[in-house]
Image (cartoon, helix red, strand yellow):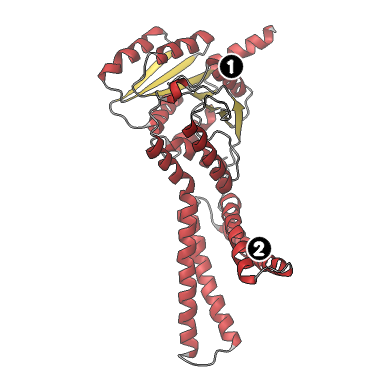
Amino acid sequence: MEEMETGREKALADAVILIPSLEPDERLPAYVRQLADSGFGHIVVVDDGSDESYQDIFRRIGETDPRVQVLHHEVNRGKGVALKTGYRWIQENLPESSGVITADADGQHTVGDCVHLAEELEKGKRALYLGSRDFSQPNVPPKSRTGNRFTSVLFFLLYGKWLQDTQTGLRAFRREDLPFMTEVEGERFEYEMNVLIACARHDLPMIPITIETVYENENRGTHYHPLKDSMRIFRVIIRGFVRFMGASIICFLVDHLLFNVLNLLAFGNGAAKAMKYIALSTAGARVVSASLNFALNKKFVFRLKGHTGGAIAKYIVVAAAIMLLSAGGVWLLGRIGMNSTLAKIIVDTLLYFLSYRIQQKWVFGEKEA
């Protein structure tokens, strides 16, 4: 028992609690005091541009305990920027810390749950730990339940990871991932979704940790704007897939235009078309459009920064496999009596999503060193 207590004390002493805050109420000083009393060695609060009437709260927080550090933004810059400000300060000033636990200032995250995440960090496994709420609880506001379920399903479809709580602010990660988290794009609430996407793409494990589901006063104290911020998050999730669709449409048009141009050059208007020349026109157009598709996917869709040699070979393998699967799928559905046109639509739609996932994960995926 004494060893367990000693291990917990070390975990709390080594971890850093980071709390971004905008125009807080008296719950924040009480929360910071509880965290300090529980044994946390470092607590960083970032004032994200609150006006003068709130500065007394931040002054009292900063004066209560030497373990508490308050940072300030002159103007509101967004939760994502506030988190990055905290990350940079921790990286520069707390070299011995084990990792960072981010928590919200509105009372949703209990001290006990923060302690639990600190103990997980102390085990040393490199991962993003996500405080996961139970949205079946009766105290969860309908807008929060619906929004989280929708984003969970969409995230799974596009990134292959099932996360019950995609919008949790209670997260933890090891100190060595501070540079990675700082480089993720995003300034406001969409930043946290960008982090999940970056972890999925770089194979950084995301581990849900069950936490208490706390919603005080139906979560009216939050600065999350239900419509504006939900749309921003939705755009973040589908942004890559929309680019993928755009690249596909461009290459489809190039393929058909080039095929027709090559046909005209080879035969002229009204000339009989030999099968071998049609095949050559088809192959030439497909080579050009496929090369363009690879370049667009690499640079604009998946934004691969490394070498392209391995990616080119993988892309060719995927393209060939998708073509064979398409032919095989249409044939199989035809065998059970389905119209070939309908079968082609169904099979190619499913394969389109499969192609996106394989290219995202395997062809253009970048594993974090």
- Picture residue at 46% right of the left edge, 90% below the top: 268
Q: CA distance from mark 2 to mark 1?
A: 49 Å
Q: Quadrant location of the C terminus?
A: top right
Which element carries disc 2, helix, strand or loop?
Answer: helix
Farthest-out residue, left: 52
- Picture residue at 52% right of the left edge, 61% below the top: 294
Quarter assignment of residue 320: bottom right
Farthest-out residue, right: 335
The image shows a total of numbered marks equal to 2
Is 53 displayed left or right of 26 in the figure?
Answer: left
Work out whether residue 309 or residue 283 is closer to the camera in this orientation and state it. Answer: 283
Q: For the residue marked with disc 2, what is the amino acid?
A: Ala
x then y, percent, for residue 73:
31, 26
Q: Earlier in the sequence, mark 2 or mark 1?
A: 1
Work out whether residue 10 or residue 170 is closer to the camera in this orientation and state it. Answer: 170
Residue 328 tag number: none
Q: For the residue marked with disc 1, what is the amino acid?
A: Ala
Q: Is residue 171 visible?
A: yes
- Can you identify the residue that label 2 sits on? 321
- Picture residue at 30% right of the left edge, 16% below the top: 55
- Can you identify the residue that label 1 sits on? 11
x then y, percent, for residue 164:
58, 35
Q: In this rendering, is residue 323 above or below 36?
A: below
Q: Quadrant location of the N terminus?
A: top right
Is 303 displayed left or right of 25 in the figure?
Answer: right
x then y, percent, for residue 244:
49, 56
